[in-house]
Amino acid sequence: MNANHDADLLQDLPAITEAELAALHDRLAEQAEADGLLDVAYRTLDTPVGTLLLAATPAGLVRVAYPVEGHDQVLQNLATQISPRVLSAPRRLDAAAREIDEYFAGRRHRFGLPLDHRLSSGFRREVLAQLPSIGYGHTASYATIAAACHRVVKSGGELGNYRGGPAAKRFLVELEGKAA
């Protein structure tokens, strides 16, 4: 076949409406979810701080991105860091969107969403673990959290990672153990 014949075939196809295209996309997202092929679902949400990009894996909310981060770049990073099977599938993020809306409306003071922490590590992950202990309307400095983080050990008493190194962590844990 030649290029002109192919173009003629496409001209004979009926036009598709935005609503039909959206319905096809929804069916694709539902089927991908049902078949376990949707590794990262995303949606956007208009908020008082701009349009947020929310992304979730089956394990939970994995990323919230502000407009200044460049949503397309964030999606590319998710495809690289987690899986290329990324799709706009708002349903997976309905609970997250609802909780964020309630937060901005002043009706929610704690979030109850499952989280996927796979993109955070080191001190950043330790800070995220401390956030629930900081009450609504309160703040804590990174220095305060850092001072408390040497107390964090793995189950079974292993010291685990520490920004100051294992010797420094061992010293601090022993020092506090003597004082207790």
Image (cartoon, rainbow, N blue to C red):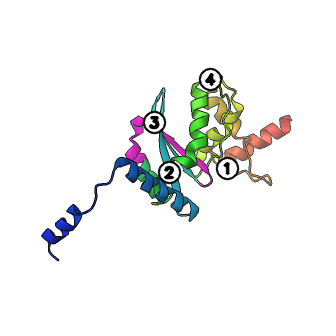
> Is residue 14 placed above or below 163 in the rendered structure?
below
Marking on residue 106:
4
Marking on residue 89:
2
Secondary element type, mark 1: helix
Label 1 – label 4 distance at C-alpha = 43 Å
Q: Give the image location of residue 42, x and y in percent.
A: 49, 48
Magenta-span inclusion, residue 105: no
Rendered image quadrant of residue 15? bottom left
Which dot, 4 or 2, sits closer to the camera?
A: 2
Q: Give the image location of residue 25, x and y in percent.
A: 43, 54
Q: Marks 4 and 1: in contact by CB < 8 Å?
A: no
Task: Specify which label sits upstream in the sequence, 4 or 3.
Answer: 3
Give amino acid for label 4.
Gly
Which dot, 1 or 2, sits closer to the camera?
A: 2
- Near mark 3 (Cα within 10 A), the count class, few <14, some 14-19 or many ≥20, is some
Label 4 – label 2 distance at C-alpha = 27 Å
Task: Specify which label sits upstream in the sequence, 1 or 4.
Answer: 4
Q: Which residues are magenta?
A: 58-74
Determine whether, in the image, residue 57 is placed left or right of residue 18: right
Q: Is residue 11 visible?
A: yes
Where does label 3 land, which residue? 66
- Near mark 4 (Cα within 10 A), the count class, few <14, some 14-19 or many ≥20, is few
Task: Specify which label sits upstream in the sequence, 2 or 3.
Answer: 3
Which dot, 1 or 4, sits closer to the camera?
A: 4
The residue at the far bottom in this view is: 1
